[in-house]
Image: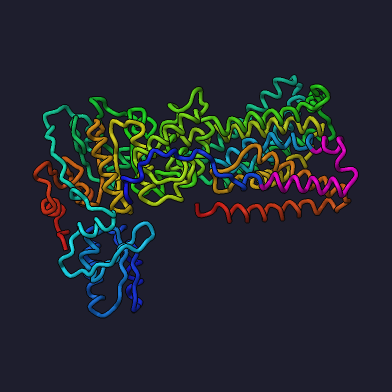
Amino acid sequence: MNTDTLSTSAPISRKKSFNFGSFTIIAIALSLFIFLSFASDTFLSTRNIYSILYGVSFQFFAIIGFTYLMIMGEIDLSVGSVYAFSGMFMGYLMVMMKVPLLPAMGISLLVCVLMGMLTGFLVVRFRLNSMMVTIATLTLIRGLSSYFVKAMYGATYPPAMRHLSKIEIGDVYITIIAMVVLVIVLEILLKKSAMFKRMYFVGENRQTARIYGIKSDRIKIAMFAISALAAAVGGILISSRVSYADTAIGLGLEFQLLTAAVLGGASLYGGKGSILGSCIGLIFLATILNGMVIFNIEPLLQQLIIGVILIISVFIDTRLNRGN
Amino acid sequence: MVEILRCISNNQQIILLDEPTSGLNNDETCKLMQIIRDLRDKGITIIYISHRINEVLEISDRITILRDGKYICTYLNDGNLTEDDLVSAMVGRELSESLYSKKIFIDASANPVFYKVEGLSKKNALNPIGFELHEGVITVSQMIYGLEGKDTGEITFKNEKLTKITPPELLKKKILYLNNNRKKAGLLLGSGAADNMMMPKMDELSTLSFLNNSAIADYTEKYIRLFSIVIPNIFEKPRNLSGGNQQKLMISMCIGTNPELMIVNEPTRGIDVGAKSEIHKFILEAAKQGTGFIIFSSDLPELMGLCDRIYVMKNKSIVGELAGDQIDEESVFALAAGSGRC
């Protein structure tokens, strides 16, 4: 190498090379959208699109922390259970203990955050595998929730709680507005903020991040707490919509989120992912299920389809990201 | 070593060894050299690829030099060939000075102590050791950077006892660590050069946690130029760079923070001689600007060229200290006894 000729004063390019990877999911979702619009009369109605978005807006809360943890190379499979638990616990407090709306909500969210912190602490302090720890907490929290289901059998939640998911701002449900605002804000933060950038560094190489002074353990515990909090908010809203303690709430949600996040560019190996991508992944899955309903495809096949999509996306993720 | 032996024991006719000694110590290298000579005498062809010029010179009959992916020339090793011939062919120009020009020794033992390690130990890994670094002078790397736990020991920096030895605390005091294995840790191979550069000084390069992208770009560009890193754009991933450029990028990440002290572990591992001599220049330059250096290396000529004082370690303990004129290969090997030159 000749150093004399290399140190020229020619400007060094500052253009980022175009990355197709992040646009694949948008392209696939868009083509599915166009296909369904032509293939069916009912798909492209405002009401149908609106109901897809409304459905997604609940799950969206749960995928926020989930995506952050995937970026950091961890996974939180307990989100589905927390999603179910938070609403049922809040409902239980209101129905059985006659606690007013806001305190009940506060207590429920607080308990969920503490559970998230505990999970994070276990993962960080004892270097436990987050997948195994959160499978354990998934089972544990699900067990707690089934107690509430039994205790509140036949009861519906009070009107104040049922009203939460129906709040509208200018004819649009508040959950949809929250989703749009959060996607924009969180996406900007993820790209521009030093705080969030550190998550990518930790996810790509924890040791390297550590050498350069990034407190990865602290960030991880915080993100497990945020994951639980966000899932709990989504869970309270979905319980408000369902209006009674239903065992089906959040069942298998973790796998749906995983599929959506991987489709949206997150990697099981960490260091990649975005809130926007995950959100589009969720919309994509919801659109497929919606299309299946329109074409009268056996609902039991839905699980199968999600399974197949998950395998394909994990396959692509591994091909693209392993060995890095 | 086992891998090399396994490959050799298979009775092959041609053996291709790619940087076989990069993971070996001096003793093992000697043994390997002997084995290779025996095999050659038995009529087995060996293709030996290495950056270590003295090894190549020692055991090869013919030496072919490649540079930037191109064939340069082939020498017949008839005994008249010198290291300088090979180096200049590799670098592509005559070296005006010897690659390892001896550093001018600065005797600073009278100066105040700048950094001091006392009684550092870890069970089964390190017997208590201690050393001092005086102001104006340059001097168990992961342990003193807090990446590995220690059992006992105290570290004093600028007359202040360091109570919390963790990377974030040390960074605040402008003590940085350069890891020996950039692929394992030290460099994010899959993130852009600019992301890597800003990592140790993110707080400085952002306002209210929002990254100042143009400042980051300027900062990155400055160091790319300063260290003449060959890179197409500032967002290029280090994975696509050569080893030498990766190493230079990693060093600029550290030097960019204007460190007071750098703990450097194998600064020139697995890179070509051109980049190696450049890195040596950067280290000496930074030292002149006032940065203290503690260098850990298994490359003796490198240590001789860079250090004012050398501590020799053997069997988990420091066995000797050499300073200034005392530093020569024989003395170091004598201290590390049993591993003489082959």
Residue pictured at 77% horizontal, 32% vertical: A239
Q: Is residue A275 left or right of residue B184?
A: right
In this picture, residue A5 sits left or right of residue B237: left
Residue located 87% across and 38% down the image: A45
Quarter location, residue A92: top right
Determine if the magenta segment contains residue A299: no
Q: Residue at x 85, y 34 (%)?
A: A154
Which sits in the foreground, B329 or A17? A17
Q: Is residue A220 above or below residue B232?
A: above
What's the residue at 49%, 33% (across, down)? A218
Q: Residue B8, image x and y in percent?
A: 32, 73
Q: Is residue B148 visible?
A: no
What secondary structure characterizes most of the magenta part?
helix
Tell me if B153 is positioned left or right of A136 in this view: left
Q: Position of residue A232 (x, y in %)?
A: 68, 32
Q: Nearer the viewer, residue B20 or B161?
A: B20
Location of residue A23 in the rendering, given as x and y in whole percent from the top left corner: 65, 45
Q: Is residue A38 magenta?
A: yes
Which segment did they paint magenta?
A24-52
* Residue A146 falls in image quadrant: top right
Residue closest to the eye, B130 or B298: B298
Q: What percent of the width, then of the height, locates residue A220?
A: 52, 36
